[in-house]
Image: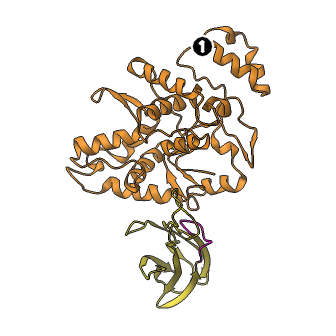
Amino acid sequence: MVGYRLTLGLMLASALMLVHAQTPGMAQVMQISESPMDKPLSGFHFLTPETRAMQQDDFANPGYLWVAAGAEAFQQNVGAGSCASCHDTKAMVGVATRYPKFDESAQTLINLEGQINQCRTKRQQLPALALESQGMLALSSFITQQSQGMPTSVSIHGPAAPWLERGKAYFFQRRGQLNLACHQCHDESWGKMLRGDQVSQGQPNGFPAYRLEWQSLGSLHRRLQDCESGVRAQTQELGSDAYLALELYLVWRSQGLALESPAVRR
Amino acid sequence: MTDQPTVRLSVPERAKAGEVIEIKVMIQHDMESGYRRGSLGEAIPRDIIKHFRCSMHGETIFAAEFHPGVAANPLLSFHMRAQRSGMLTFEWIDQTGVRWSKQAELAVE
């Protein structure tokens, strides 16, 4: 952790980071509950004014098509009962801020999509929704939108701790023909130009997000696959343990950022 | 494409007679241009909406023709002068003639 913090402090030419590096607390071993990013910046920060305007206009933002479909699906009486027969919509506020989390019954880490499928198979007696299907994106974006504006608060203690370590290792692992680690672009080089775009910090707070490149809403895991194929690496499966661990690390790393889903991203 | 795409409408519920109101509509559609290829090099066939029409009392208020250059999930924004109350009908027709429509009530006082 100290090495990581020093690397950040040394390599980022941000005045803010340099000031922070001189504060007395810096030399101490970082508490695990503390996010490694000093001041996380949402992907929103790196968008053009036009794309920002698109996200902020609730009508022009196409992500709300999925949110609207999800609001309907939430009430729809299917299987052993609708989502709403157990959950009040108001009770969904803040739920998305706590995922991914370690699930005691499944004895594994699950994200919001995993929770939706667990509800479907265990409570509603329905088949699981395919990840990235329209039905899944509708429900996940609707539920995440209920927490819009709220900061994430994932647990990284107890059984979640090894998952965080695994996610962190993934983030720092060089991969692909380009031999790049997530960390090299999104910790060391954010703010710099990569062809026509500014490299972002790789924050997950906008997902599920409407990406202009996709012309569709998509999950964080789909975005991770894009990053990996970008460095010409073998992509992992959607919902795989590797991506769940990475998701936990990314969400923890983004601590303090408000959820923006459905965000618009380039 | 799903059989029943999500449609979002933004129509004021009421307007004063003679008032100019803004109407916004969005439909979920891939608007596949036909110019793209998949990861295996196969051509992805064109699948687009061709026509849009907004009407009231059988009279066309606004109509549009779409082409392959239109992005997915097309958003339209237009203005109309509110004259009498009635049901606004919005319809989209795709290249094969499939039609989707949605209505909204406008009260003019």
Magenta run includes residue B71 = yes
Q: How is the image coloured?
A: by chain
Residue A94 in which image quadrant: top left
Secondary structure beneath label 1: loop
Q: Magenta segment range?
A: B67-74
Of A133 and B90, nearer the camera is A133
Name the chain under label 1.
A
Q: Where residue A183 sits in the image (x, y, percent)?
A: 63, 29
The orange-tinted chain is A
Q: Amino acid at mark 1?
A: Met
**Residue bearing the label numbered 1:** A30
Q: Residue at x 44, y 83 (%)?
A: B97
Q: Left of A124 or right of it: where is B31?
A: right
Q: Residue at x 53, y 66 (%)?
A: B73
Of A87 and A107, nearer the camera is A107
Q: Callout 1 environment at 10 Å: few (<14), some (14 to 19), or many (20+)? A: some
Instruction: Please identify which colour was used for chain B in the image.
Output: yellow
Tell me the chief SS of the magenta region: loop
Q: Is residue A18 above or below residue B26?
A: above
Q: Where residue A73 sits in the image (x, y, percent)?
A: 34, 56
Q: Is residue A16 above or below residue A95?
A: above
Magenta run includes residue A49 = no
Q: Left of B18 or right of it: where is A249?
A: left
Q: Is residue A105 above or below residue B26?
A: above
Q: Left of A13 or right of it: where is A92?
A: left
Q: Where residue A149 sits in the image (x, y, percent)?
A: 55, 41
Quadrant where the N terminus of chain B sits is: bottom left
